[in-house]
Amino acid sequence: MFQADIVREDAPSFQGEGQLAIKVDSVSKSFTRWQRKEDASEKADRSGKKSAVEEESSSEKKALRKKGILGKVEFKSIFRQEKKTLTALDNVSFQVRRGEFVAYAGPNGAGKSTTMKLLSGMLQPTTGAISVLGMSPEKDRIALMKKLGVLFENRTELWWDHPVIQSFEWKKVVWDIPDAVYRRNLDMVTELLDIGEIRNTFARELSLGQRMRADLAMMLLHSPELILLDEPTLGLDVVAKRQMIEFLKRINREEGVTILVTSHDMDDLEEMAQRILMISGGKLVYDGSFDGLREITGNLTHFTVTTDGGQPELEGCKLLGGKNGVFEFEVDLSCCPMKGLLKRLSQADGIMDVEIWKAPIEQVIAQLYREWR
Amino acid sequence: MRERKVINGVKRYFELLGIYAKMDLASLMRDRAFMAIVITADIVSNISSISGIFLLAWKFGGIGGMDRFEVLFMLAYGNIVMGFLNMMGGCNALFPSRIIGRGQWEHMFIMPLPYAVQLTVGIFPFTGSSSLLSGIGMLWAAVHHMETVLPWWWPGMLLFQLFISMVIVVAASYLFSSLAFYAPVQCEEISSTVIYSMDHTRNFPLSGMPLYIRYPLLTIFPAGLMAWFPTMILLGKTTTWVNFYPAVFALLISFVSAYFFRKGFGYYVKKGINRYVSGGHRS
């Protein structure tokens, strides 16, 4: 109920199909997989409860284990395996307009990568329809791939045993990129991603950050209209991450490239994207702005109070920590409005300085993830 | 308009072959001494792999009704078949179960080319041609020493039979690779196991072998169609109607293979994902 409401309130609606870069309509994706069948005691162990019968069987097992008859892994579990149907995506619908920069987030196993694979035609949905740049990833794969750029964090399209520039030349031929477009884009990515020095280096000799930059550069050589990025900043150092973020923002702003990006780094996502789609347990649970997301969790705000030494008593505010006269508080502005907070601060004794800021988006998201579990 | 499209298509195909050939040449030129050692070792290895059979034929003046140079011709024919396929299938196109098992098909999805084109343009003409070169050399030596007078159309027939044998090998590889769509890890090497088993078996001359050995090797495990049977056709040792058998078999196995490969592929894109397919992917 909570999750569905969030999507309905913030979901943007678009009029024309032509202005859409992505249209996902009631898409579900399920898989089957083998897994070991849990016995009653395992279930109880997991839930932390045990019935009298289970207690008894558990003590018998302990005795058998002591005798060495049963190992740590139950022998019979080898013969008791079951096939389970797993729903990776459950009736997911959303749209992305051309030129938008959208973040796609969710906890581990939520269905982010599955969505990316569905959008890039690597998988087909069990039910529902997908349209990317007005084309079907399944039926119009070749035409779509000429306009789509895909970058997965754990994959590289670079040729491992060749210099980076060789991979670029390979791409020019395979994607049939006209000379003028290739030269223009090569100059652009070389300058913006600062890859001049690594262009002639073998891909296998690059650091992770360099490899990601080279991969990103290669992805852009055919002037894609839509880019799908799965964890592009994962494992990058601060400098490489800044470079990547600035570049993505720039091509979105100046070239009008539509970008859909997944990441676990919420601060990065907030800096890059204008809108966030959140998925949990295969369901779309939020579609809207980052500020809207904060409001859902109660508009959390943090503030630091510097005093002459004593801890101020502030009703409705939660003390997060304090040291040497500097105390950090958290307050929910939807319950305690800013006016009231300022009044309380002005009435408190010994206050020398106050600094107020929004709660980090990481904290907001963490709170949501905990609620969804 | 249609002609123009075909010409552009052919031109583009050669462009693609060209970029892979260029990359292969770049690898070769990077460390010429090292590559020379690798290619020489490959040629020596290819020749030594068939030398056992040839030495037996030399010692006994032939095997099963084939004289020593006819045996050499058969061995050379097999080397050309496998040599050409190895050269063309450098990007594992000859072993698609590896592509599936290693999750590499995902790279193919995002390339704006038909899968058939992607699978056939990844050539290694410079670093992967040692087996082909040794085969051609051996074939030339065998024909040079044979006393048979060859008719004018014989080279055409040779090329046709080589093509048919290659189709059979590729079709067998794709047929067994279909299983990898359902169990990627378990079947990752199934195509190489099948093809290399056929490759080892094709060296034995089947002339004089009992029918219960010969027939299975010409049908359910068609190693006999990789070298021995085409050799018999090319040397004029078969009856006319039997000469069509390899072509008919190639057509049949190609259809069966295409059917099962498409079916497996459909399963893969509908149900498959590296984390969920039973057995998953290696990477």
Image (cartoon, helix red, strand yellow):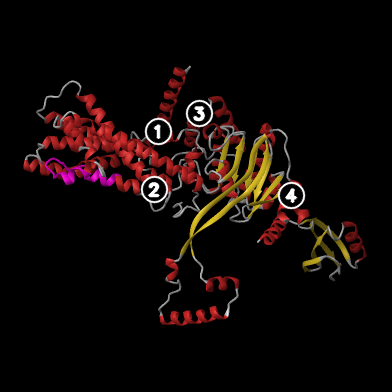
Q: Name the quarter where the C terminus of chain A is drawn.
A: bottom right
Residue displayed at 43% across by 20% down = B7
Which label is found at residue B121? 1
Instruction: Classify mark 4: helix, strand or loop.
Output: helix
Q: Could you tell me the amino acid type at mark 2?
A: Leu
Side of A82 relative to A45 (left or right): left
- Can you see residue A160? no
Task: Say whether marks 4 and 1 touch (CB < 8 Å).
Answer: no
Give the alpha-carbon distance from disc 3 to disc 4, as whole Å.
39 Å
Residue highlighted by disc 4: A290
Q: Mark 1 is on which residue type?
A: Val
Which range of residues does the magenta coloring cover?
A: B195-216
Which residue is pictured at 78% across the width and 68% down the height? A322
Dot placed on the residue nearer the N-terminal end, 2 or 1: 1
Q: Is residue B113 visible?
A: yes
Label 4 crowd bin: few (<14), some (14–19), many (20+), radius 10 Å: many
Residue beneath disc 2: B179
Name the residue located 76 percent from the left edge and 57 percent from the top edge.
Answer: A297
